[in-house]
Image (cartoon, rainbow, N blue to C red):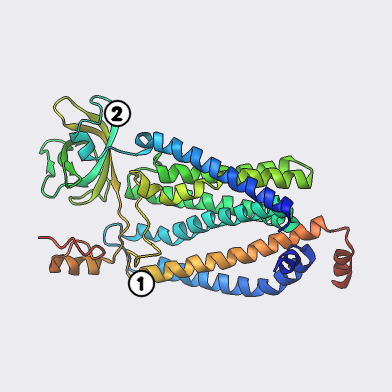
Amino acid sequence: MWTLFHKFGSPKWFFGIAGRLMPWLLALGLGLLVAGLVWGLAFAPKDYLQGNSYRIIFIHVPSAFLAQSVYLMMAVAAVVTLVWRMKLADLFVQAVAPVGAVLTFLALFTGAVWGKPTWGTWWIWDARLTSMLILLFLYFGAIVLGSAISDEKASARAVAVLILVGVVNIPIIKYSVEWWNTLHQPATFKLTEKPSMPPEMWVPLLLSVLGLYLWFGWLACYRMQTEILRRERRTRWVRELVRAEGH
Amino acid sequence: MHPLRKKRLTIILFLLAGVGVAVGLTTYALRQNINLFYDPSQIAAGEAPANVRIRAGGMVEQGSVVRAQQDLTVHFRVTDFASSVPVQYTGILPDLFAEGQGVVAVGRLNTEGTFVAEQVLAKHDENYMPPEVSDALKKAGVDNPYTESTVTQ
């Protein structure tokens, strides 16, 4: 088991696997995402109270889900960086941190646009909104710290510690709506109960969530491949690869 | 597993547990500050200070909304089904404001125990349904299809 784990840590091996996975991830991800969004934005029934403005959920919920998942994945990668000193784990963190930041911003922005007509305010300092803003700052912190330290190994460790300290924010985001009084409503999707939504609304939502996750998988592979080529540009296998591409 | 790696993993687990406990205790101590609003039971129990800007939240009581003839003043009661607080507000209410809907009001509690609001925000719940379904449910006399216990009126 450990040999497979260490094999997985080899950038060259990952480069090949990622290249084979990427077309599938991109095709499936984009397909599901477009299907979910078109269905949700154009064909799903409107809500009895909010009318059409609720449709922002088809962008807001997938990006908020993924923003938190990306952080959790980065936290797992941070543990691998600190314990096993695996280069690939740090590569992953560097590659996806900006993606996570964009997703968090998208969740906050779409939430504000929806909040104005629904709640009557763009922003309120309730526990859910504030903890999500902290997540955005954690992403910014990871990006800035990663690029501020020029030594690759030192920078990887510093970023990993920052991410691990910040991971405590994730359960706070998730349970903020249950632990405290907030303006943000509790979750519509629960793992244990059926969703508080009819199927003609939650099926397109589920499609866009799945699509966004798969598309993220493609983007992560793509960004990691680029970073691998940059960092390993002096190794023999990258030189041979470039030569084989016909230069 | 290599002993050095085991040691590093233990350090990380201690770090996570330590940060978790610290944040847990802090948020527990600050829970009243983190709560966005006081609910009507807390106000009835005298936990909310008078003449200080606070937020009060709950459901708009059925049949309690009274609009003034001359201006935009609205009187209504906010309830958590245990106690309720009278609220007075002058201004434009959000679209979602209705009897039986959740609201959060920003304002001051005056000495007579009326909450004078400067701003009223609508609180949306987690339930979504198409208008036709909602109409059909209203005809059948069901308030909320997602919680089986609330078959009322």
Quarter that holds the C terminus of chain A: bottom right
Asked if marks 1 and 2 touch (Cβ < 8 Å), the reply is no
- Is A11 placed left or right of A142 in the picture? right
Query: Total marks drawn?
Result: 2
Near-viewer residue (A191 or A215): A191
A132 over A66 or under it: above or below: above
Name the foreground residue: A124 vs A15: A15
Residue B99 horizontal side relative to residue A77, left or right: left
B97 left or right of A245 in image:
left
Residue A188 x %, y %: 36, 60
Task: From the top left corner, tell me how far across and down residue A246 is, in percent.
Answer: 87, 72
Q: Is residue A187 above or below residue B85?
A: below
Read off the residue under disc 2. B53
Identify the mark at residue A37; answer none if there is no mark: none
| Residue A171 to residue B144: above or below | above
Frontmost residue, A156 versus B63: A156
Instruction: Using the numbered discs, state the Cα–Cα distance from disc 1 to disc 2 in whole angstroms.
Output: 43 Å
Q: To which chain does the residue with label 2 belong? A: B
Q: Give the amino acid at mark 1.
A: Glu
User: Can you say which quadrant of the picture contains the N terminus of chain A?
Assistant: bottom right
**Label 1 crowd (10 A; few <14 / some 14-19 / many >=20):** some
Mark 1 vs mark 2, foreground winner is: 2
Q: Residue at x 18, y 44 (%)?
A: B79
Q: Residues within 10 Å of mark 2 (few under 14, many from 20)?
A: some
Image x and y of residue B151, in percent: 15, 63
The percent coordinates of residue A241 (x first, y second) are 85, 69
Q: Disc 1 marks which residue?
A: A200
Element class at badge 1: helix
Q: Quadrant of residue B46?
A: top left
Identified by mark 2, the residue type is Arg
